[in-house]
Image (spheres, rainbow, N blue to C red):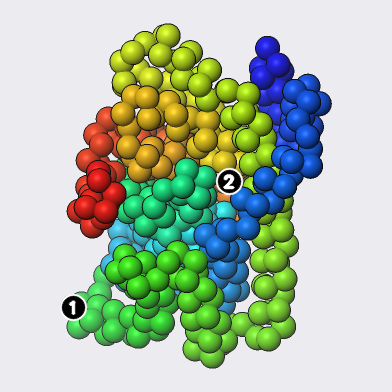
């Protein structure tokens, strides 16, 4: 009963528009008061957990994403991808999907991906007469690719929370991320099939295409090298996620300032300042949510949930269905960081009980919470996309729902029902070390 009241308080505060850290703080204070925990001990434990080198990757990726946005590195990526698909009616939606996947593989953040890629493609789509609702829905639904395509800040949190391999969590989301990227492009193409007013790029000869490709590639090479360095370093074992995040920052600064020449010293200082503010908010939120998670763990909530689900059914896939519904609801009312930190420790014992690998669980969480971030009523990415494209959220909801049903849901089903869908790469590269 007390736990139910706690979640009612949390959800009510979130729906009333109270900032997420304060909402969790209010629910945590209620738990401390009711169960009589020592606030100093809970705070000390949370502070100790935050003192982790793994978490240092998050502010570094936030700063790298800000530099890429302000330095127009994302624009170079979009122009390069547009060479291949720009002559299709749905060309810019394919560009958005692929560019979001590439950008997400560098900055590791869905919000940063939407802010950067969305702000670049919005005027391009308007100029080509794309329906604003479908255009904004495409940007909104491709943004969570930053939560799946590694290195992902969300997967860093999952690995840190569950004390499992960061690299294996990264690898588990690669195939789901690629499949989701392709499906989003296909669904966008279907939605645009009857919109004949869309202007496409003029057809070119092979010689003209070769020249255009050479010019765009030359411009994009510095931007394309970033994911190669970061992902190559992580997958080869030469760098940890934190080290690769540091390399991303160090590499992006001269690229933005001296190659693309879109960022000056004042802009860099502002970007770092904004990154510091965002980091402070994220770390404050992580600390508060971890305090709440620790209390819930100590009072036995994970075991209670496990027993409750097993009392409903002993079938693995029925339990996974209920867990998926729970995570989607969490993603609908919370941001990805809060939902991850709350769901991971609570649901992990359930996954262990039914024999689901922690790395498959990490992939399921990635797809689920990404889908929740674009599903009303909260849907933070949907409302951010509406602001970027200067339209109302109701115009985005119908095409966004089509993308959820046609792209996210099939990817989630594959990830949930077929373990090899997410475990093939971790097993291939790290199987001997992880025993999976």
Mark count:
2
For the C terminus, the quadrant is top left
Q: Nearer the viewer, residue 235 or 335?
A: 235
Position of 143 relative to 76 (above/below): above
For marks 2 and 1, give the one nearer the viewer: 2
Residue 222, placed above or below residue 429:
below
**In the picture, residue 293 is in which quadrant?**
top right
Say if residue 205 shows up in the picture. yes
Q: Position of residue 199 (x, y in %)?
A: 40, 60
Taking 255 as reference, is 313 left or right?
left
Q: Is residue 210 above or below residue 338?
A: below
Q: Position of residue 348 (x, y in %)?
A: 45, 33
Cα–Cα gap, marks 2 and 1 = 47 Å
State left or right for residue 65 relative to residue 10.
left
On the rendered structure, is 116 left or right of 182? right
In the displayed structure, would residue 109 be above or below residue 65?
A: above
* Residue placed most toward the observer, 389 or 354: 354
Residue at image mark 1: 206
Quick one: SS at disc 2? helix
Quadrant (top left/top right/bottom left/bottom right) for the N terminus:
top right
Q: Image quadrant of residue 66?
A: bottom right
Please provide percent x and percent y for residue 395. Answer: 56, 39
Dot 1: element: helix
Q: Residue 337: which numbered mark, if any?
A: 2
């Amino acid at each position: 009963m007390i736990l139910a009241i706690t979640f009612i308080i949390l959800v009510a505060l979130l729906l009333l528009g109270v900032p997420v850290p304060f909402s969790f703080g209010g629910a945590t204070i209620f738990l401390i008061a009711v169960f009589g925990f020592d606030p100093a001990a809970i705070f000390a434990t949370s502070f100790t957990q935050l003192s982790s080198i793994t978490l240092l990757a998050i502010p570094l990726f936030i700063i790298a994403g800000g530099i890429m946005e302000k330095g127009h590195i994302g624009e170079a990526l979009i122009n390069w991808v547009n060479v291949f698909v720009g002559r299709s009616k749905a060309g810019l939606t394919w560009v958005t999907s692929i560019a979001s996947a590439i950008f997400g593989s560098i900055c590791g953040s869905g919000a940063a991906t939407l802010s950067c890629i969305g702000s670049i493609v919005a005027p391009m789509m308007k100029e080509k007469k794309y329906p604003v609702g479908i255009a904004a829905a495409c940007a909104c639904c491709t943004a969570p690719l930053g939560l799946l395509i590694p290195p992902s800040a969300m997967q860093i949190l999952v690995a840190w929370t569950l004390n499992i391999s960061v690299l294996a969590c990264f690898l588990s989301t690669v195939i789901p991320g690629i499949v989701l990227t392709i499906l989003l492009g296909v669904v966008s193409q279907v939605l645009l099939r009857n919109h004949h007013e869309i202007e496409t790029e003029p057809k070119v000869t092979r010689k003209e295409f070769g020249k255009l490709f050479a010019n765009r590639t030359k411009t994009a090479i510095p931007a394309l090298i970033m994911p190669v360095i970061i992902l190559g370093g992580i997958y080869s074992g030469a760098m940890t996620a934190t080290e690769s995040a540091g390399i991303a920052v160090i590499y992006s600064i001269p690229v933005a300032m001296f190659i693309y020449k879109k960022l000056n010293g004042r802009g860099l200082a502002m970007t770092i300042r904004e990154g510091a503010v965002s980091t402070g908010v994220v770390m404050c939120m992580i600390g508060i949510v971890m305090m709440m998670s620790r209390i819930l763990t100590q009072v036995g909530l994970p075991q209670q949930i496990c027993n409750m689900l097993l009392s409903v059914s002993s079938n693995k896939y029925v339990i996974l269905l209920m867990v998926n519904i729970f995570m989607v609801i969490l993603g609908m009312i919370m941001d990805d960081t809060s939902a991850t930190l709350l769901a991971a420790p609570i649901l992990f014992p359930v996954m262990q009980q039914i024999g689901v690998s922690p790395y498959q669980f990490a992939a399921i969480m990635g797809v689920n919470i990404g889908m929740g971030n674009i599903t009303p009523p909260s849907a933070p990415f949907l409302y951010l996309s509406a602001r970027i494209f200067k339209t109302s959220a109701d115009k985005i909801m119908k095409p966004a729902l089509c993308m959820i049903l046609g792209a996210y849901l099939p990817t989630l089903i594959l990830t949930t029902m077929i373990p090899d869908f997410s475990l093939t790469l971790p097993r291939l590269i790290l199987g001997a070390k992880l025993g999976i």
